[in-house]
Amino acid sequence: MKRFEEYAAEFVETIGGYWGPKTTCVWLVLGMVSSAAIILGAVAALILKIGGVS
């Protein structure tokens, strides 16, 4: 089973052929940041619900 880094490297290599490695890296970082924000938002909403705030 491949690790995430290997998938990421493969992705950058494949997509990098179309856009160039810098653009691909920017999109990869933006994707990870937005994913983290979505997950944190969901966790915060869950905590607020359990706490009885909302």
Image: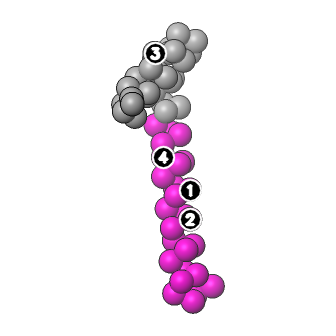
- Sequence-wise, the earlier of marks 2 and 3 is 3
Dot 2 amino acid type = Ala
Q: Nearer the viewer, mark 4 or mark 2?
A: 2
Q: Tell me the SS state at disc 3.
A: helix
Q: Alpha-carbon neighbours of circle 4 within 10 Å: few (<14), some, or many (≥20)?
A: few
Callouts 1 and 2 close, C-beta under 8 Å = yes
- Sequence-wise, the earlier of marks 3 and 4 is 3
Q: Which residue is mark 3?
A: 13
Q: Which residue is mark 2?
A: 42
Q: Is residue 36 visible?
A: yes
Position in image of residue 31 (x %, y %): 53, 40
Q: Which residue is mark 1?
A: 38
Q: Which corner quadrant of the image does residue 5 belong to? A: top left
Q: Tell me the SS state at disc 4.
A: helix
Q: Which residue is mark 4?
A: 33
Callouts 4 and 1 close, C-beta under 8 Å = no
- Sequence-wise, the earlier of marks 4 and 1 is 4
Bounds of the magenta span?
Answer: 29-54
**Main SS, magenta residues:** helix
Q: Which corner quadrant of the image does residue 45 belong to? A: bottom right
Position in image of residue 38 (x %, y %): 56, 56
Q: Tell me the SS state at disc 1.
A: helix
Q: Tell me the SS state at disc 2.
A: helix
Dot 1 amino acid type = Ile
Rounded to the nearest angstrom, the CA distance separating label 1 from label 2 is 6 Å
Question: Quarter of the image containing the C terminus?
Answer: bottom right
